[in-house]
């Protein structure tokens, strides 16, 4: 009997886990296309690397665990984790970053817990967090805009040489806008000066704001198809917007606007594609609101006062730890339970 999930409590539909994963993959396509348009062929190689490594790791672990390989590989969960990681890491990151990240994610955050449905932490975020802690330079080097605002675009073979042969591209890659914002604010720059630097767009990073918009539209489509519920995205984005608005009003020229936080970094990816993971998120409607609001709050705290420019991965993992407690205190009462033996 196939494993089925009713993603939205108000939905009368029931999806197999493979159908859910496939629909989420479809929703990622617009953002992947924009990454390709803005940054070049690096995303193609990263997807090839993560998907290949994910399938190999999945098959090996299923064999070692004596589980039916075809049935579990066909659920598309490993491919989804691979694509999410590929979208999250810099397009020109060395090949071993992708392979190490997805292999670590599937082995230590999925199979060692017993496989899909038993893991307590989001595998993609475990792999991403491990890479960010271990290799901070490689994980924060995105293509940057020059003085004219033109972003370095890596062609097919050029991106291959950079990723697989460690071809140096000094001056063509650098810190993200979140990192630039954080570093310059720590150096007492005024916010109005920072947003005039190359690479900044209307509300966030020049390219990142468009990629975030594509992720937002893909996420709305998932909510419309009732693949995910509205509670987690709305609570996460809402709490982040509220706390960022409060500090922006209080410290107008030293705290970025709420729109900057919403359309920079991995906010939209986290809100619609990561935090909504039905295995590691809270299950009750009220619990989902608390869970997602906590993620939004932690993202702001880490970005503003933590040691990393973006805090989505750490925020999700911290709230994953709180899920059992949230579920315990937010599940609706079972009527008649007090009369049972």
Image (cartoon, helix red, strand yellow):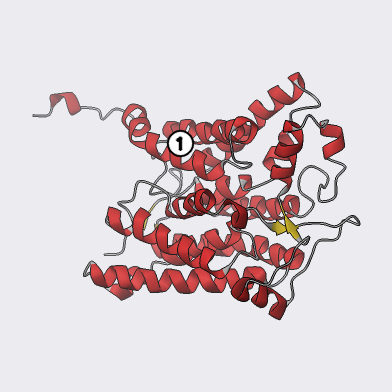
Residue 339 percent coordinates (x, y): 13, 25
Q: Secondary structure at mark 1?
A: helix
Residue plotted at (74% across, 19% down): 250
Residue 12 percent coordinates (x, y): 43, 50
Q: Nearer the viewer, residue 89 or 118?
A: 89
Q: Say which quadrant the N terminus sits in.
A: bottom left
Q: Nearer the viewer, residue 275 or 53?
A: 53
Residue plotted at (66% across, 53% down): 217
Say how many tags the image has. 1
Residue 80 percent coordinates (x, y): 48, 63
Q: In the rendered view, would you say 2 is above or below 117?
A: below
Q: Residue furthest bottom?
A: 157
Q: Is residue 255 visible?
A: yes
Q: In the rendered view, would you say 202 is above or below 69?
A: above
Residue pointed to by mark 1: 288
Q: Quadrant of residue 248?
A: top right
Report whether 114 appears left or right of 101: left
Residue plotted at (60% across, 55% down): 139
Q: In the rendered view, would you say 68 is above or below 207?
A: below
Q: Nearer the viewer, residue 105 or 293?
A: 105
**Mark 1 Cα shell of 10 Å, populated few (<14), some (14-19), many (≥20):** many
């Amino acid at each position: 009997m196939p494993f089925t999930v009713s993603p939205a409590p108000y939905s009368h539909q029931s999806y197999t886990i493979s159908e859910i994963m496939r629909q989420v993959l479809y929703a990622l396509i617009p953002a992947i296309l924009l990454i390709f348009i803005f940054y070049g062929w690096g995303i193609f190689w990263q997807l090839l690397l993560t998907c290949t490594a994910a399938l190999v790791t999945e098959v090996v672990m299923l064999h070692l665990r004596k589980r039916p390989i075809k049935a579990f590989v066909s659920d598309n969960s490993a491919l989804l984790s691979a694509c999410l990681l590929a979208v999250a890491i810099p397009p020109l990151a060395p090949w071993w970053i992708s392979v190490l990240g997805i292999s670590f994610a599937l082995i230590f955050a999925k199979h060692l817990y017993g496989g899909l449905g038993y893991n307590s932490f989001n595998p993609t975020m475990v792999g991403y967090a491990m890479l960010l802690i271990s290799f901070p330079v490689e994980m924060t080097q995105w293509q940057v805009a020059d003085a004219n605002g033109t972003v370095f675009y890596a062609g097919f073979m050029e991106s291959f040489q950079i990723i697989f042969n460690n071809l140096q591209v000094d001056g063509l890659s650098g810190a993200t806008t979140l990192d630039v914002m954080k570093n310059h604010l720590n150096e007492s720059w005024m916010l109005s000066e920072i947003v005039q630097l190359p690479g900044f767009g209307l509300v966030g990073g020049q390219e990142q704001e468009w990629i975030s918009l594509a992720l937002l539209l893909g996420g709305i489509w998932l909510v419309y198809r009732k693949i995910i519920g509205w509670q987690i995205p709305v609570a996460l984005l809402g709490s982040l917007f509220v706390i960022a608005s409060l500090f922006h009003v209080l410290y107008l020229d030293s705290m970025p606007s709420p729109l900057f936080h919403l359309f920079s970094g991995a906010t939209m990816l986290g809100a619609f594609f990561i935090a909504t993971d039905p295995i590691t998120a809270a299950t009750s409607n009220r619990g989902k609101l608390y869970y997602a609001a906590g993620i939004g709050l932690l993202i702001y705290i880490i970005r503003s006062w933590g040691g990393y420019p973006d805090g989505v991965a750490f925020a999700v993992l911290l709230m994953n730890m709180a899920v059992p407690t949230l579920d315990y205190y937010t599940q609706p009462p079972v009527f008649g339970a007090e009369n049972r033996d």
